[in-house]
Image (cartoon, coloured by chain):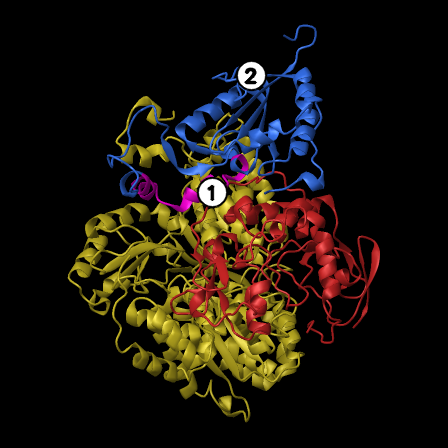
Amino acid sequence: MSGTITIDGKTVPFTGGQTIMDAALEAGVYIPHLCHNPEFKPHGSCKLCVVEANGRNVTSCTMPASPDMVVINDTPELNEDRKALVQMLFVEGNHICPACEATGNCQLQAAGYYLHMQSPRFMHFYPPRRVDASHPDIFLDLNRCILCELCVRASRDIDKKNVFGISGRGIDSHLVVNSESGKLGDTNMTVTDKAAHVCPTGAILIKRKGYTMPIGKRTFDQKTLREFHLEQQKRVEPKDGPDGG
Amino acid sequence: MADEKRKIRIATCSLAGCFGCHTSMLDIDERLFDLLKMVEFDRTPFTDIKHCGPCDIGIVEGGVSNAENARVLREFRENCKVLVAIGPCAITGNVPALRNNIDLWDCFQEVYLYDPGTEGKQIPNDSELPLPFDKVYPIYEVVKVDYFLHGCPPPAEAIWKFLTDLIQGKEPEIDYELLRYD
Amino acid sequence: MMQPPDLPDIEQRLAIICERHDCEPHRLLQILIEVQEMYAFIPPEAITTIGKHLNLPRVSVEGAAGFYSFLSLEPAGQYRVLFSDNVTDRMLGNEELMRHFCNRLWLEPGKVSEDELVSTDLTSCTGMCDQGPAALINGWPVTRLNRERIDLIADLILSKSPVSDWPPTLFEVNDNIRRTARLLGEPFEPGSAIRAALMRGADATLGELKLSRLRGRGGAGYVTADKWTACRNSQGAARYIVCNADEGEPGTFKDRILLNRYADMVFEGMTVGARLLGSAKGFLYLRGEYRYLLKKLEEVLVQRCEAGLLGSNILGEPGFDFDIEIHLGAGAYICGEESALIESLEGRRGRPRNRPPYPAQHGYLDQPTVVNNVETFACAAMIAACGGKWFRETGTRDSSGSKVLSIAGDCTLPGIYEYPFGVSVQKILEDCGAQEPYAVQVGGPSGILVSWQEFERTISFEDLPTAGAFTIFRRGRDILEAVRNYAHFFAHESCGFCTPCRVGTQLQKKIVDKIANGHGTASDLEELKQLGHLMRTMSHCGLGHTAPNPVLDMLQKFPGAYEQKLTSLSFEPAFDLDAALATARRITGRDDPWAHLP
């Protein structure tokens, strides 16, 4: 199945198996997102990419495109809702930007800028979360985890190691690692693993690499999240499988 | 003072913060003179006035870490028509809020009982000392806040733009380049 | 924290359990339930060992173990007493009873006693609303709790008597069937529906189902014949029939009665479905709270096998093979959502899947699967036996047949009532002896809060669709407290997958608490509405979509419930500033005026 859909009035082609997000990104149409990364199997948890398709709200990174679908994406209403989701992500964790090595390169932060987040809006949860420095090369700080599961997917699908998983439920959902001690240092993760390099925030950091980029030269000093994500799409190899390989 | 045309009256303070935002305010450099043509300062660390009187704009740096912070903040809210949270400490709690997941008793013990540098090994209980809350709170969780100005500290440019907008009675608008949470 | 106990032979003991489950990864949840029973928690070593035997990553085992409320990753004591916390339990005084219990045993809710003997906590509705307050003790339901019963239970625990030796009266569960209609009232002979289906043929029987206009009884009301046809038309190596007995909607308990008294009819409906769809395997997903029914249900399955109504060549029909396996849940409301239920059946966390694809095409093990409610299968059996026209004779145009309701709350005769669709709320209230009814929560917290001004409305898909809960509040009941209970329920049961529901249900809970505590403002009401909009429009599944329902219904229909509690101030902090100084006052021993904030 292939054909075209329209996104905010613009005609966008799609091929069989593509989601709304796939088609949009390929056509250079930006739908804000955090848990999606074209290199990995879609997940659909952050909900930033919710759009209205044929009158119904759907998650664009998991919803297959279908012929003549009418998609509404870039509206003040949807962007307000997306901003509220980003505000939720900020208050449910402990995001202390000035003290985080990922600052300036953090997609959560950039989503806040892109959606013009001026206030935290909601009360802060200040949840007690774990910090794990047991690994010689990798630092794990769950205060900053937004449960996008990119590391879970990378470790499972690319590294074939299953270093990460999610346990707990609801607001207590949290990242766990593949060792009885619960420590990253006791897993077989290495710094060359894909999973070490996909975290959109500062929850997974490479040790001894912090603050190497001066202010002004960091990713989101120079570009918006929109520009970053559209470039990310271009870096991904052309797809050869229906599920995005 | 301002006779013919009433000047905008501004108060500022730093609660649980580092005065970095205030330092950045001074970084508007010679524009300070332009600012002073438009405004006059009530309570600020610059004037050393101890209590806030009726003001048009209150600018609060820092979070609410103790009872004294809360009292000052309430005084600002009562006296200022517009209240601005400046910097991440006021907006999210920021670095001072790192203590929010450490038990207060553990904090006290560490500082006053275990630290080898302390003498006497006792917990101070003087009524002049501000009593700490269980947690550090951003100011908007304690009083109503009208505007938020991000940046640790906000760049002088952002402060200048923000203040001149407010003084001119406009909705403050911060350009994408100047909106930074760090 | 307690020292983890020494578990010397854990590897051998777990090997035996895993072998008994054929080291089948889909049996993971069933294995974990056994381990929980054996050790009163899931030790970290067990997670590693199970992972090895089942060839699963350790994180997958830990992920499942951490998801379900009845599994515990920390030692939970030899006796685990979970007080049901539905609003009906509240109205019957469960909080006071729990306090009494804690005082008797020197316990703190959520913590294990120092001697590691006992722990207690609240749990979501256990489905005993017509005979509450209720609790689960090591998974066994106790009903009609009062001070005497609590004292008895405390004594039994202190004497370390095994729960199996406790007086059976404690565990008595009544059916309380008060009114029957065509489903519960007609005699049903096991085998009659299968025989009729075989005689009529699969196509014709599906035709009868279509003619009946049966719609799913789980609440959403999808046309059953359409669901079954979609599954039948889907390509797959196998097809599966799944009966959703994860009756978790607070206030609903009709499936408990259907399973206790009408199990044959339910299993027969599944078997008819198997014939129509060409399925050889069915599952009954039984909520953990109803585990006490497991033995009885398995006996019914054995009887049905012996009678030729299950197993190979059913009723002598060559090639008509169908087996039903009972799969236990372990405390997760979300597993009532059909795709989360399938995930749970496969041994994983109960996380709703992305849809499409739908279970009818890609369900259990990625094969075409039909998931229906217990009552839907019972209806299907009756339709197969008596025909679609017979079924349609009662009910309304868009809601054929009857509905089994679970009635509880402020009435003299709580229990099970079956009515033809189209019955008015008023009529039901009269029949059950409702006292000064003021509001009714129809369909549980995810349903509709109906006010006294709407009692002429009818139970039907056109007007008030419901999975069966019907909770009555008399005049004078605190609606805000009820809504607060529901807000806590959703926050507890959100699976945590998507942002709007995971965080939104928490924020909703906090704001409702703030209002209930007398600190709410007009802007808090506005925020509740906006959160409601966000959860409804952005959430991943029905839980998030419906979580704001009771709150929004209250805002719209019951202003009296919250208006007096609001402060006139434009802003109020969500926390008590003076209370937030209490710890520091205690540490410093200060009580001077500066150590307080009025």
What letter labels the chain drawn in yellow? C
| Residue C343 position in % (x across, y down) | 52, 70
The vertical placement of B19 against C35, above or below, is above
The vertical placement of A79 against B155, above or below, is below
Q: Which residue is mark 1?
A: C510
Camera-side mark, 2 or 1: 2
| Residue A42 position in % (x across, y down) | 64, 65
User: Which quarter of the rendering shows the N terminus of chain B?
Assistant: top right
Q: Which mark is residue B42?
A: 2
What letter labels the chain drawn in red? A
Q: Colour of chain B?
A: blue
Range of magenta residues: B90-111
Chain letter for mark 1, please: C
Determine contact: label 2, label 1, CB under 8 Å.
Answer: no
Toward the viewer: A88 or C560?
A88
Disc 2 with disc 1 on a shared chain: no
In this rendering, does residue C189 appear at all? no
In the drawing, does residue A237 fall left or right of residue C351? Answer: right
In the drawing, does residue C97 fall left or right of residue A209? Answer: left
Toward the viewer: C509 or C155?
C509
